[in-house]
Image (spheres, coloured by chain):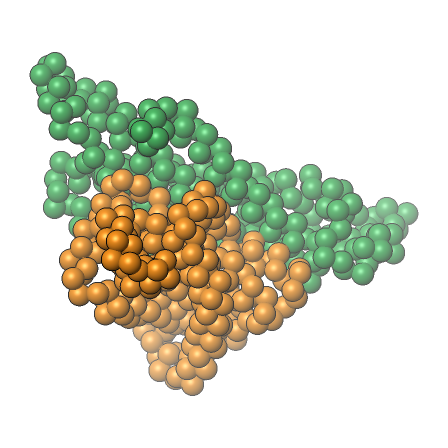
Amino acid sequence: MQTLINAFSFFGHHLDLFRDKTIAHLAISFASIGVALAIAIPLGVWLGHLHRGSFFAINVSNIGRALPSLAVISIAIGIVGIGFANTMVALVILAAPVMLTNAYVAVDQVDTNAVQAARAMGMRPWQVLMRVELPLAVPLIFAGIRTATVYVVATATLATFAGGGGLGDIIVNEATYGSAGVVAGALAITVLAFAIDGLLAVVQRAVTPRPLRHLARRASAAATVREPLPPLPAPPQ
Amino acid sequence: MISGLITPAAGGPVIPTFGKSSTCVVQNHQFCMSWFLDNFSSRFQPRLLEHIELTAIAVGVGMVIAFAAALLAHTQSWFETPFSLLAAFFYTIPALAFFEVMVQVTGINRLTAEIALVSYTLLILFRNTLTGLRAVPDDALQAAEAMGLTRRQTLTRVELPLALPPIMAGIRIATVTTISLTTVAAYIGAGGLGEPIFDGIQTGFKTEFVAAGFLAVALALVADGLLVIVQRLLTPWARRVRRA
């Protein structure tokens, strides 16, 4: 209990430190998520639209989940060297597979009746994708983005070992900040991870087309029953 | 004689055998195969075995707890929500933070690491076991009852075999994620492949942390592959159904 009180008083006395580290933490997280988004979402949506490459699109996230993040970071240090870029490489490798698989599954599983109706109405493939498949796939695509984002924000803690900065710097520097600082840093990261998750839950609801909102919940429950693999990604590191 | 004293023993200098090392080690290239092969049995093999042991204990203990909880939740449905919430809470805490907080409670040792590692397995194992038990078709349960099976017999002979695919899938995910988290657990002195990773990053000797990183990745992928095979052998009917 005393540790907790000390941690809170440490937090109160070092607001500037926490602000700077949180900004650095979010910077590396969002830079990585941006790159991962740019690679994974178009590829996943495109493969899903063509209904091709299911083996690749689904198994890539099984492999992505199996990769130990610290190991990926350590290999990346060897190849890229210490710094921001290194951590980004590792985080992109860890975030992209989840996004890719979800985007693929989301577009691939869009009701064929809807797609055929759209074609019968004379829509071009591009229009089918933009007006029918994507709106119907948004909830699941965004679920993947949310999962990956929470994962990246949590894993960015390990960036400290690669000189990437962020809140991990406080956690691993007991010599400077003491055990109160370590606990305060740990709590700050935990709160940040939960806050991002909650925030994205709200955004996810907002981007889901209104008629799909009640369906989205039921669909995710059904997906859990049929195939328990996709919904749970690796826990944050 | 002096050169004989400086050997790459445990706790010895990071870049051992000064002056005698290969140019690759002296110039600190990304990966020195010969150094890795020379030091595998002394530096990496024990860590690899430790890693497997830590993972096996965590998944084993996690499975016992999650299984008991899932059985309870299967009969007493009110139990599902509180346990899921607790497990989901553990699951979202960043590992390094979790380890550091637990250190304040139980100290720097293996127990601390295992407590955290077990906590991470609970959500996956609980959810998958419960999902499996609930997905057992009513027809099968009614047939079991009609055949006069007791509650216990129904569980062991009908429900568990039918629930096996999702349970195995859960064990698979729990295992690979635990392998991943165990690398971080080395930071609080739990041992495992994270040890040479942290050691190498600290000293800057690339071969050490790159090799340990690759070993950890290989271990995760091999474990994943092996569990897929076990899963298929144990549940040959699951594949046929999916294909149909």
Of residues A218 and B105, which is closer to you in this image? A218
Residue B60 vs A211, above or below: the answer is above
Give how far across and how far down residue A39 sits, in percent.
49, 62
Is residue B115 depicted above or below A167 in this figure?
Answer: above
The percent coordinates of residue A94 (x first, y second) are 48, 57
Instruction: Locate the C terminus of chain A and report the quarter of the image it occupies.
Output: bottom left
Question: Dividing the picture into quarters, in which one does residue A201 lie?
Answer: bottom left
User: Relative to residue A97, is residue A16 depicted above or below?
Assistant: below
For the N terminus of chain A, the image quarter is: bottom left
Q: Residue at x 26, y 45 (%)?
A: A224
Q: Is residue A90 left or right of residue B239?
A: right
Q: Residue at x 12, y 40 (%)?
A: B76
* Residue A176 visible: yes
Residue B187 seen anywhere in this rendered image of the structure: no
Instruction: State the residue in front, A213 or B194.
Output: A213
* Residue positioned most to the top: B147
Q: Which chain is green?
A: B
Give the chain coloured orange. Answer: A
Q: How many marks?
A: 0
Residue at (60, 51) in percent of width and height: B213
Q: Residue B13: x and y, percent? A: 74, 56
Residue at image x 47%, y 76%? A27
Question: Residue B181, percent across and down?
Answer: 46, 51
- Viewer-side residue, B67 vs A152: A152
The one of A73 and B122 positioned closer to us in this rendering = A73
